[in-house]
Structure formats: C-alpha cells, structure tokens
Amino acid sequence: EPEVTQTPSHQVTQMGQEVILRCVPISNHLYFYWYRQILGQKVEFLVSFYNNEISEKSEIFDDQFSVERPDGSNFTLKIRSTKLEDSAMYFCASSGDGGATGELFFGEGSRLTVL
Amino acid sequence: KNEVEQSPQNLTAQEGEFITINCSYSVGISALHWLQQHPGGGIVSLFMLSSGKKKHGRLIATINIQEKHSSLHITASHPRDSAVYICAVTGAGSYQLTFGKGTKLSVIP
C-alpha cells in the first residue's frame, strides 16, 4: 500500500540551528501539507502546498519556516533558526485530487527536539 | 475561526462495548475528518465526511451538517482500538484543517 515517508524520525538540534525535515508523499498525489503537534497539545496546521506553491499557511508559519518541493518527489520543511518552542512532532500529509476534501495520508512524523 | 470540541476527553471501555465519540464545530465546513493517533504518535485517516454516514468494518461515522455535529461509533470494541481519536474540519474554501484535542480511548480486555 502506498505510504507517506518522513525522515528523520527524530532530530535533536541546538537552538539557532537550521533544520530540514523531509517527506516523500504518495507519488500521484497533488496536495501536500505540514502539521505540528507540541507534546500534550492538539495537532496544528502549518501549511498547504499545491502546484509548486503555498496555497495556504497558518499564523504559526512565519518567516522562519519555508517549504519546497525540490525534485518532484521530496517535500521539505525548513526551519531557519530553531527556537526552543519549535520542539514538536512534525507530520507531513498528502492527498489526491480531492484537495482539502480528499482523504489525507499522513507520515509517521518527525520528532524535533531543540536544546 | 472554527472551534472543534470533542467529548469525552478520555474514555475507558470493556472489550465488546459499543463506543461513541462526539465532535462539534462552530462554523460551516466543507469536510470533516476522523483520525486515529497510535500510541507511537502516527496518524491514520479513518473517515472523511461531508454528509451522511460512512461505515468501515466496526467503525461508523455520521455527520449532521445542520447541527454542526459528528459522531464516531465503534461496535464490539477491542483492545487494539485503544488510541487517540481526533476530529478535524476543513472550512469552506480552505485547505486548513482545524483539529480537536482528541479523545483518548482505552479498551480493557
């Protein structure tokens, strides 16, 4: 069964360092998303991406964050200068031609710990 | 901005019991998702609904658009159903999912 894969599963970094989280969505999907979940809190939307551009972003997704689909298969989330409060589980998801009303397929998540 | 409320927050059931988890939201939506989060953290989509009712195995999801309410039912619950169940909604014309806090279900043998 096709799946969304994320790497790394866990990353520990020092405050101020740049981090890149990688995702390989399902190959024929068109819509891509990043979400985060701070420990003990609810999942929060960060950004959606369609047709090689951001289609929507939340207030959390400030200038420290960027997304890219560099090679047609990977979908990356970059945090330029990490802060302690960026520590969270980051989930990538993709959906087919249903977009926001289509079934979502999530990766297993990347846990980011900022020290 | 949509507010998504789930009840109960925690639920403990005996194996075999019928379980209901409720979700209400404040603003009209284009779709509602029921998700399952495993103890290890991974998230799996169970249902996507825009109207009516869907069934998959022992799971049933319903939505009442007029009342802004959805329910997830589990029949003949089993310990492997133990997980956090999350309701999330997509606003009309939006890609943004708004999530509830989740319902932690524990099914005891």
Image (cartoon, coloured by chain):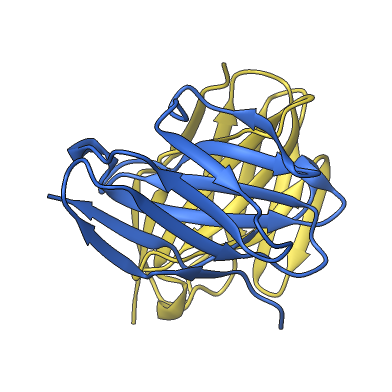
Chain colours: A blue, B yellow
Of residue B70 and residue A102, the one placed in the foreground of this image is: A102
Q: Which sits in the foreground, A79 or B91?
A: A79
Residue lying at the far left in this picture: please name it: A115
The image shows a total of numbered marks equal to 0
A76 and B96: which one is in front? A76
Residue A104 shows in the view:
no
Which residue ends up furthest to the right in the rendered image? A97
Q: Residue at x 80, y 53 (%)?
A: A30
Q: Is residue B62 left or right of residue A8?
A: right
Q: Can you say which quadrant of the picture contains the N terminus of chain B?
A: top right
Residue B13: percent from the left, percent from the top? Answer: 37, 65
Residue drawn at point x = 57 percent, y = 21 percent: B2
The image position of residue A5, as x and y in percent, is: 55, 72
Tell me which residue sits at (79%, 60%) in the image: A29
Residue A88 is situated, as x and y percent measured from the top left of the image, at 30, 49
Query: Is residue A44 rendered to the left or right of residue B34?
Result: left
Q: Is residue A78 visible?
A: yes
Is A78 left or right of A97, judged from the image as shown? left
Residue that appears at 21% across and 40% down: A16
Quarter of the image that includes the C terminus of chain B: bottom left
Q: Is residue A59 left or right of residue B91?
A: left
Vertical order, B24 against A35 (above or below): above
Instruction: Work out whether B84 lies above or below A53.
Output: below
Identify the image quadrant of residue B37. bottom left
Above or below — where is A1 with respect to A50?
below
Q: Where in the figure is residue B69, as x and y percent of width and height?
A: 64, 32
Q: Quadrant of residue B65?
A: top right
